[in-house]
Image: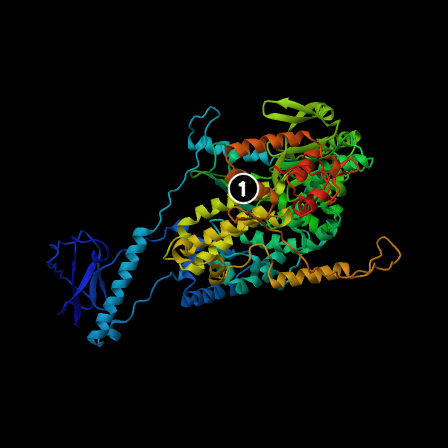
């Protein structure tokens, strides 16, 4: 009935590696058992070992080439994962598959009613034409020459090896089951765990019953708004298991938008009181972390209709939020505001207070001018951490905040209708329940960040009470991280700061927000004669350390007292916060590089791809917040050394082997400067600077004054003095280093003892003839010293150029009255 080619193969069982596989022989036999059917198998012996028949396998007839082979059977996707986004992305890479799906969806939505579910249409269209490769016609390949058949056999062999490798090396992730314990650590049944989860979230979202609201005017969204919402939707976004995956929505967006727009107009028309239930229910996915429901990390998966509605509402709400937040120090979720601005505001307070603390103790020169030490000086900071901020927002307060922001009434009604009818679907061990939410913002909703910004601004306005607390002067908020700072100049200032902190803590409790005492700290630093006495009034000793005590609602609240704290990725405090921040970023960057080390050092991955992964993951971890904190010279050197070392490890270009310099390595790998901005960014900064400072300014209404004349002074004679050793010729940059070299290298033990005695005597002999006006100021070079010890060292070591010239000149004995011998 037609020729069939039989492939005679053998396997080398005694070897390993690339030789351990199926190899095709040159022998081909023809059989006439039917098209593509082979019923013969031969095992050959080789010189390396004896062949043996393989184990049980699936031997299929391949009509493509008319030969029989044993192909690894790929795992079939289960029905539970049929709607996964990853599988949809893989299948939609085939253009024919994509085109067929679009035509199927277009036919099904053409005559669809407004009550039909678009998710069902997409899923039905997807399953109607399952992914697969169409079988070629045998008649087309029957007359192919032998070389084409052999070439096809080779291609099939490669496909077999690739399929087998994927099946063997595929990572099978073990399912982690959520297991909760009782209060005493005992195990529970599935039913008890489910009841514990449901009870926890019912208590968490329990709130007053929401009043029913009705839309007075219908909401109509344009196709442009729908297209923009679909463009913002990520194809990798997870959706509930009962809905179509996001890639299908993205692919067929132009086809389903008209039907989706008609459904929105139908359900959001005037007089609407209830939204479709499918739009209001979101799946609550619990990531197993700890043994208690309070420690779980919940993720809410919203249906696409709810995501699109929230996205379009957020775009309309954006203008009202920006106008409302114009004078509020909330720097998150608003255009033209960033995390850097919040950090600059906090760190400027830290730097100014640190300078004031250092200047609170006048030196001898300042004392001579009449300056006295301040009785009290310093600063105070309160960094707040709020637990479950989004979940504890009262709905009544949210309505008041939207009204205060002058949001249209119908938009407020629709927003509150979405939240009032929101439900969470919890599944655990084949058990399911829906939980109503009486408070809080809907998790996973595009409206939540913007609503939190509006609510937090309203909350700050309620807390603003100028006699006690001025939000504009002391407050800084980024998302749910709140920070307050106060300057202390007198004793009354620390009392006002204490009352302001108490006012903030009491206000947050009054509005239903819970302050996490573990994440909340007070940073307090005082200097001056009254500092210790003042601290004793407010600081108490606790088992966890020193704390600040507040009496709120007849209850003592203790907040930890710290010297530094991590805020928005930076270490804040009144000490060396630049070094502390860099040390923290350096540690985190090393940890990130260690986690990616297996990939970054893998030679099979292209070098350019590894460098991009390194710059995209390790560099942001290292450089975060450093542009606001600043990097001292020593830390900058450590930063460059770390990056060069990691780059050499990734590129396998170690200097001891390749002799490649750092500059040559940077140029070869085309690495940008990690801290210096590029030309485009520098140009933009200068343009913004010109807009800010070149315009005529009338803020202070000051009269224009003539700018002082200035000129450049040429500096032609810049001499870097070098000190030569007369004994060995070695050169030193300072006289002190030369004297130390003489003492340690060219002096014997007797000379060292004599010099030590001479130095001890010189310390007891005052060098007041070199002081100016009885102050520790060198009368020769006019350099001012803050301590007498530094002045004596300056004179005794001949660090003064004028003294050194006098002592080394030919007429030194005549021109110098008294100069003590150097150490």
What kind of element bears circle 1?
Answer: helix
Q: Quadrant of residue 577?
A: top right
Position of residue 175 relative to residue 230, above or below, is above
Q: What colour-coding does the image apply?
A: rainbow
Query: Where is residue 304 shown, x and y percent of the image?
Result: 54, 53
Position of residue 766 relative to residue 37, above or below, is above
Question: Furthest-right residue in view?
Answer: 703
Query: Where is residue 225 shown, x and y percent of the image?
Result: 62, 61
Q: For this rendering, which residue is in front, 809 or 688?
A: 809
Left or right relative to 161: residue 231: right
Image quadrant where one finds the N terminus: bottom left
Query: Where is residue 750 shown, x and y percent of the image?
Result: 52, 32
Residue where numbered disc 1 is placed = 741
The total of numbered circles placed on residues is 1
Image quadrant where one finds the C terminus: top right
Query: Where is residue 232 shown, x and y percent of the image?
Result: 57, 58
- Residue 398 in sight in this render: no
Left or right relative to 101: residue 676: right
Q: For this rendering, which residue is in front, 368 or 407?
A: 368
- Residue 392 in sight in this render: yes
Q: For this rendering, which residue is in front, 156 or 354?
A: 354
Left or right relative to 479: residue 594: left
* Residue neighbourhood size for the residue with mark 1, other residues' Cα within 10 Å, grouped as few (<14), some (14–19), many (≥20): some
Q: Which residue is located at x 79 percent, y 30 percent?
A: 492
Q: For this rendering, which residue is in front, 415 or 7?
A: 7
Q: Which residue is located at x 74 percent, y 62 percent?
A: 690
């Amino acid at each position: 009935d037609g020729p069939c080619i039989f492939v005679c193969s053998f396997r080398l069982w005694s070897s390993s590696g690339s030789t351990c596989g199926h190899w095709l022989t040159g022998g081909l036999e023809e059989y006439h058992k039917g098209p593509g059917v082979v019923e013969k198998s031969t095992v050959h012996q080789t010189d390396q070992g004896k062949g043996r028949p393989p184990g049980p396998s699936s031997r299929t007839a391949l009509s493509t080439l008319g030969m029989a082979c044993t192909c690894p059977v790929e795992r079939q996707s289960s029905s539970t994962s049929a709607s996964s986004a990853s599988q949809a992305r893989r299948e939609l890479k085939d253009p024919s598959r994509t085109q067929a799906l679009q035509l199927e969806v277009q036919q099904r939505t053409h005559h669809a009613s407004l009550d039909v579910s678009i998710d069902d249409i997409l899923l039905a269209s997807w399953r109607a034409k399952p992914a697969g490769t169409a079988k070629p016609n045998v008649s087309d390949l029957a007359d192919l020459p032998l070389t084409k058949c052999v070439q096809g056999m080779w291609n099939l062999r490669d496909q077999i090896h690739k399929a087998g490798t994927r099946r063997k090396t595929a990572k099978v992730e073990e399912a982690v089951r959520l297991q909760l314990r009782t209060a005493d650590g005992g195990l529970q049944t599935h039913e008890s765990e489910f009841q514990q989860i449901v009870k926890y979230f019912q208590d968490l979202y329990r709130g007053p019953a929401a009043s029913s609201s009705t839309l007075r005017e219908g909401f109509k969204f344009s196709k442009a708004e729908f297209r923009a919402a679909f463009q913002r939707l990520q194809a990798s976004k997870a959706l509930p298991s009962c809905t179509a995956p996001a890639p299908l929505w993205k692919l067929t967006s132009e086809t389903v938008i008209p039907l989706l727009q008609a459904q929105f107009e139908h359900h959001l028309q005037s007089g609407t009181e209830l939204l479709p239930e499918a739009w209001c229910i979101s799946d609550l996915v619990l990531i197993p972390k700890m043994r208690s429901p309070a420690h779980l990390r919940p993720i809410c998966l919203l249906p696409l209709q709810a995501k699109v509605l929230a996205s379009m509402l957020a775009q309309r709400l954006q203008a009202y939020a920006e106008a409302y937040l114009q004078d509020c120090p909330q720097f998150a979720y608003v255009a033209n505001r960033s995390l850097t601005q919040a950090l600059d505001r906090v760190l400027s307070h830290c730097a100014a207070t640190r300078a004031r603390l250092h200047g609170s103790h006048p030196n001898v020169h300042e004392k001579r001018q009449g300056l006295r030490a301040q009785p009290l000086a310093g600063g105070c900071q309160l960094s707040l951490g709020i637990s479950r901020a989004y979940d504890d927002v009262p709905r009544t307060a949210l309505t008041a905040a939207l009204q205060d922001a002058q949001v249209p009434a119908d938009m407020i009604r629709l927003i509150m209708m979405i939240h009032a009818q929101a439900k969470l679907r919890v599944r655990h061990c084949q058990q399911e329940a829906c939980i109503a939410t009486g408070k809080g913002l809907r998790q996973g909703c595009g409206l939540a960040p913007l609503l939190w910004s509006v609510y937090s601004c309203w909350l700050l306005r309620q807390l603003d009470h100028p006699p006690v607390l001025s939000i504009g002067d002391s407050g800084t908020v980024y998302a749910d991280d709140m920070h307050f700072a106060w300057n202390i100049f007198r004793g009354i200032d620390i009392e006002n700061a204490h009352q302001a902190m108490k006012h903030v803590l009491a206000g947050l409790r009054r509005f239903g927000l819970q302050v996490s005492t573990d994440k909340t700290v007070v940073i307090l630093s005082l200097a001056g004669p009254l500092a210790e006495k003042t601290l004793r009034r407010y600081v108490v000793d606790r088992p966890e350390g020193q704390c600040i005590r507040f009496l709120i609602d007849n209850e003592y609240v203790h907040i930890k007292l710290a010297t530094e704290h991590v805020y928005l990725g930076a270490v804040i405090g009144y000490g060396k916060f630049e070094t502390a921040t860099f040390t923290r970023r350096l540690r985190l960057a090393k940890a990130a590089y260690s986690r990616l080390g297996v990939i970054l050092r893998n030679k099979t991955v292209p070098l350019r791809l590894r460098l991009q992964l390194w710059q995209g993951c390790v560099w942001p971890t290292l450089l975060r917040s450093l542009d606001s904190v600043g990097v001292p010279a020593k830390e900058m050197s450590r930063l460059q050394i770390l990056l060069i070392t990691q780059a050499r490890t990734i590129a396998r270009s170690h200097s001891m082997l390749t002799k490649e310099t750092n500059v040559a390595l940077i140029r070869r790998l085309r690495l940008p400067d990690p801290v210096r901005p590029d030309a485009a960014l520098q140009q933009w900064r200068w343009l913004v600077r010109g807009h800010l400072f070149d315009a005529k300014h009338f803020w202070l209404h000051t009269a224009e004054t003539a700018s002082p004349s200035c000129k450049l002074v040429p500096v032609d004679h810049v001499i870097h003095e070098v000190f030569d050793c007369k004994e060995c010729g070695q050169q030193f940059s300072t006289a002190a280093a030369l004297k130390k070299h003489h003492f340690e290298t060219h002096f014997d033990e007797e000379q060292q003892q004599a010099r030590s005695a001479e130095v001890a005597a010189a310390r007891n002999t005052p060098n007041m003839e070199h002081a100016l006006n009885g102050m520790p100021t060198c009368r020769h070079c006019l350099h001012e010293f803050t301590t007498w010890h530094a002045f004596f060292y300056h004179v005794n070591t001949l660090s003064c150029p004028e003294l050194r010239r006098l002592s080394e000149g030919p007429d030194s004995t005549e021109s110098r009255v008294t100069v003590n011998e150097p150490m």
